[in-house]
Image (cartoon, rainbow, N blue to C red):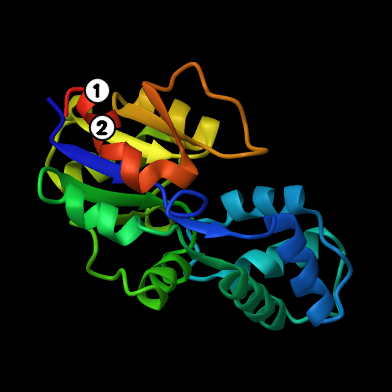
C-alpha cells in the first residue's frame, strides 16, 4: 500500500521549451563568454552541488575551461534569467500535487544548490505546495545516491517500500529510487530516453496530471 509520493522537479514538474544546452549557450552569449559544454557544466554541477547557489558552480566551470575574463556571478545571473524565461510549470502540476495530498504524503526531491531550487519554488508559488522538500545541495551527495531518497522518506515519515517516486531521469530518478527501495515511475516525453528497466511504471509527461493517480493505483496506491 502506497502512503507517499515523491517528485523530481526539473524536467518533471517544471519543464523548459528549449534544451538546457541551448539555454546555457544563450547565457554565455549574453555575457560574452565562449560556449561552454553542457557535459562540463553537469560534471561541475555534481561536484559543487553542496554550494549555496549557482555562482560557485560557474566559477568552477569557468576555471576548468580556462576562461578568466568572465565574471561567474554575471554568468550565473544570466543563466538563471534565461532558464526562468524558458521554464514553467507543467500545466496541471500544482493541481495534481494538491489532489494527491488528499490521499498521500507528497514530497519533492530535487538536485541542485539549495537557494537556486528554493527560488524556483517561490517563483512559481510552490513554497507550500509539498509536505516536504529535500534539496540535495544540503546532503552528502545528489541523486542517484540512496541517501537522497532515504532522506526524502525520513522527512515524509514513510518507509521507502510505501513510497513512489516520479521523475524523468533514467539513472538519477528511476535507478536511484529503485536502489533505495522506492517504487519508481518514469516520466517519458518525445525525444527523451527510453523506459528504464527498473521503472515500476511509466507515464507520458503531457498526460501526467490526468494519468498519474491511476498509475499510482496500479502500484498499490
Q: Judge from the rendering whether residue 177 lies leftward or rightward of residue 160; answer left or right.
A: right
Snapshot quadrant of residue 86: bottom right
Q: Image point 33% across, 44% down: which residue?
A: 210
Which residue shows up at 56% across the image and 73% down it?
Answer: 84
SS of the residue under disc 1:
helix
Is residue 199 at least partly visible in the picture? yes
Asked if 43 appears above or below 74 in the picture, the reply is above
Quarter of the figure that contains the C terminus: top left
Q: What residue is shown with label 2?
A: 214
Residue 88 position within the rendered picture, expressed as x and y whole percent measured from the top left: 50, 66
Quadrant containing the N terminus is top left
Q: Is residue 149 visible?
A: no
Residue 85 placement (x, y as % from top left): 60, 75
| Left or right side of 59 for 172 | left
Q: Up-down: is 27 above or below 219?
A: below
Q: Farthest residue to the top: give it.
A: 197
Give 197 or 138, whichever is nearer the viewer: 197
Instruction: Give the CA separation, mark 1 to mark 2.
Output: 6 Å
Residue 82 coordinates in the image, percent (x, y): 66, 74
Which element is circle 2 on? Answer: helix
Which mark, by number, is residue 218? 1
Q: Nearer the viewer, residue 220 or 20?
A: 220
The x and y percentages for residue 203 are 43, 33
Q: Residues within 10 Å of mark 1 (few under 14, many from 20)?
A: few
Amino acid at each position: 500500500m502506497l502512503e507517499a509520493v515523491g517528485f523530481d522537479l526539473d524536467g518533471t514538474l517544471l519543464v523548459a521549451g528549449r534544451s538546457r544546452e541551448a539555454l546555457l549557450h544563450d547565457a554565455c552569449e549574453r555575457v560574452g563568454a565562449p560556449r561552454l559544454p553542457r557535459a562540463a557544466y553537469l560534471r561541475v554541477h555534481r561536484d559543487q552541488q553542496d554550494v549555496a547557489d549557482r555562482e560557485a558552480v560557474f566559477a568552477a566551470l569557468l576555471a576548468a575551461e580556462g576562461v578568466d575574463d568572465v565574471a561567474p556571478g554575471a554568468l550565473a545571473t544570466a543563466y538563471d534569467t534565461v532558464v526562468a524565461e524558458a521554464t514553467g510549470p507543467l500545466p496541471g502540476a500544482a493541481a495534481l500535487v494538491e489532489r494527491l495530498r488528499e490521499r498521500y504524503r507528497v514530497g519533492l526531491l530535487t538536485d541542485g544548490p539549495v537557494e537556486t531550487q528554493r527560488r524556483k519554488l517561490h517563483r512559481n508559488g510552490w513554497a507550500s505546495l509539498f509536505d516536504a522538500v529535500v534539496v540535495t545541495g544540503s546532503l552528502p551527495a545528489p541523486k542517484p545516491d540512496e541517501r537522497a531518497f532515504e532522506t526524502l522518506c525520513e522527512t515524509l515519515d514513510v518507509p521507502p517500500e510505501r513510497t513512489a517516486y516520479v521523475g524523468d531521469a533514467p539513472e538519477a530518478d528511476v535507478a536511484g529510487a529503485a536502489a533505495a527501495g522506492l517504487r519508481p515511475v518514469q516520466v517519458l516525453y518525445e525525444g527523451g530516453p527510453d523506459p528504464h528497466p527498473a521503472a515500476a511504471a511509466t507515464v507520458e509527461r503531457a498526460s501526467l496530471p490526468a494519468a498519474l493517480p491511476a498509475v499510482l493505483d496500479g502500484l498499490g496506491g
